[in-house]
Amino acid sequence: MTPAQMEDYVDAAAAALELPLEAAHRPGVLQYLALAAGFADIVNAVPLSPHDDCAQGFLPVGPGEEAR
């Protein structure tokens, strides 16, 4: 996303959610959206094959416990 597209998205999302977005908060929202977009670019850069499946479920393992 370009910076202009991010600004448009933030404005549209806030309006759609009826979420008031104060002018003082907007730069921070845009900064974190840009950060998340950067993370997405990193994840999307990893090539996947048809055999790469997502996990069926997540079972957390506590300290000292063994994964099943």
Image (tube, rainbow, N blue to C red):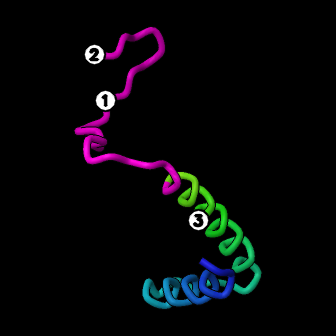
Callout 2: SS: loop
Q: Earlier in the sequence, mark 3 or mark 2?
A: 3
Q: CA distance from mark 3 to mark 1?
A: 27 Å
Residue 64 falls within the magenta-colored stretch: yes
- Write down the region rendered in magenta: 44-68
**Residue 59 sits above or below residue 4 on the image:** above
Image check: 15 left or right of 67?
right
Residue visible at 58% across and 89% down in the picture: 8
Identify the residue position indicated by label 3 in the image.
Answer: 37
Badge nearest the viewer, 3 or 2: 3
Residue visible at 61% across and 81% down in the picture: 6
**Residue 31 sits above or below residue 49 on the image:** below
Residue visible at 52% across and 54% down in the picture: 45
Q: CA distance from mark 3 to mark 2?
A: 34 Å
In the picture, the disc for residue 12 is none
Badge nearest the viewer, 3 or 1: 3
Identify the residue position indicated by label 2 in the image.
Answer: 68
Q: Mark 2 near mark 1, Cβ–Cβ under 8 Å?
A: yes
Image coordinates of residue 29 in percent, x first then y, are 66, 73
Image coordinates of residue 18 in percent, x first then y, are 47, 87
Magenta span dominant secondary structure: loop
Callout 3: SS: helix
Image check: 13 left or right of 68?
right
Q: Quadrant of residue 39?
A: bottom right
The answer to which of 3 and 23 lies nearer the viewer is 3
The answer to which of 12 and 48 lies nearer the viewer is 48
In the picture, the disc for residue 59 is 1
